[in-house]
Image (cartoon, grey):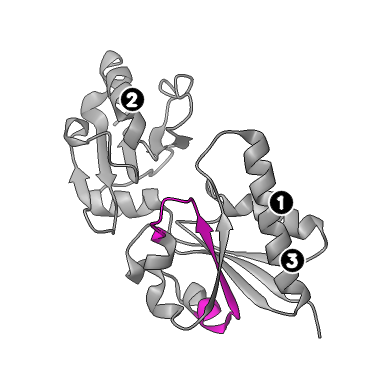
Amino acid sequence: MGQGILYGVGVGPGDPELLTLKAARILREADVVAVPDKGSGKKTALEIVAAHVEGKQLVYCDTPMTRDAARLEDSYRRGADRLCALLDKGKTVAFITLGDPAIYSTYIYLHRKVTQRGYRAELVPGVPSFCAAAARLGVSLCQGDERLLIVPASHCVEDCLDFPANQVYMKAGRNVGALRDALAARGRLEKAAAVCNCGMEGEKICPALADMREEDYFSVVLVRGRQQ
């Protein structure tokens, strides 16, 4: 029996119709679908691909919402152990992840551990949340000679706010108040818009940032550059 292969499959931001044809094919062909488990009970990535994985063996991998480096390292190690055990059995494994696996994805840590052990693994790109958000707002992310800065809003953003570029702040929900205040202090609040739960139940389009609530976890804030 040959060694299996692991795919890190980006499933897009929330709308099942934004799943790529390649992602859908790999999910159909996979022996096992690995699902990130934050412990909250809700499995958003699994809900997106539900129509493609009916009857599949599901394996849940612990991906806790914490910044405790030791706890994260332990969860990634245990997750890699589970995935490698399946690959040793010749299984094709598809690990589903929101958006694109190369953009702030938990999966990439598992990917590195698996490949460092000598196993074969591939990334399958998905539609990033900020691309879907821009489409819902009907705006361009960047054009001509404009630059684009992508920032995780859950971390310190002070050094990014004055950068001369159009800006994307991902997962901004819990930090929207501080972000709103910082933009207002710089006279840039009117240049900001947001989409919450893009493509999901409860989607909310916020042409003005004042309309966004802090509880909107799956939130993307777009800020146009000074030149616009």
Q: Is residue 5 left or right of residue 190?
A: right
Numbered marks: total: 3
Numbered disc 2: secondary structure: helix
Mark drawn on residue 119: none
Q: Which residue is mark 2?
A: 179
Mark 1 vs 2, N-terminal side: 1
**Magenta segment range?**
25-44
Residue drawn at x 62%, y 52% as measured from the top left: 108
The amino acid type of the residue labelled 3 equals Cys
Provide residue 146's location: percent of width, then percent of height: 42, 37
- Relative to 125, residue 158 above or below: above
Crowd around label 1: few <14 · some 14–19 · many ≥20 (10 Å):
some
Specify the quadrant of the image occupied by residue 202: bottom left
Q: Which residue is mark 1?
A: 77
Mark drawn on residue 84: 3
Specify the quadrant of the image occupied by residue 174: top left
Numbered disc 1: secondary structure: helix
Crowd around label 3: few <14 · some 14–19 · many ≥20 (10 Å):
many
Q: CA distance from mark 3 to mark 2?
A: 41 Å
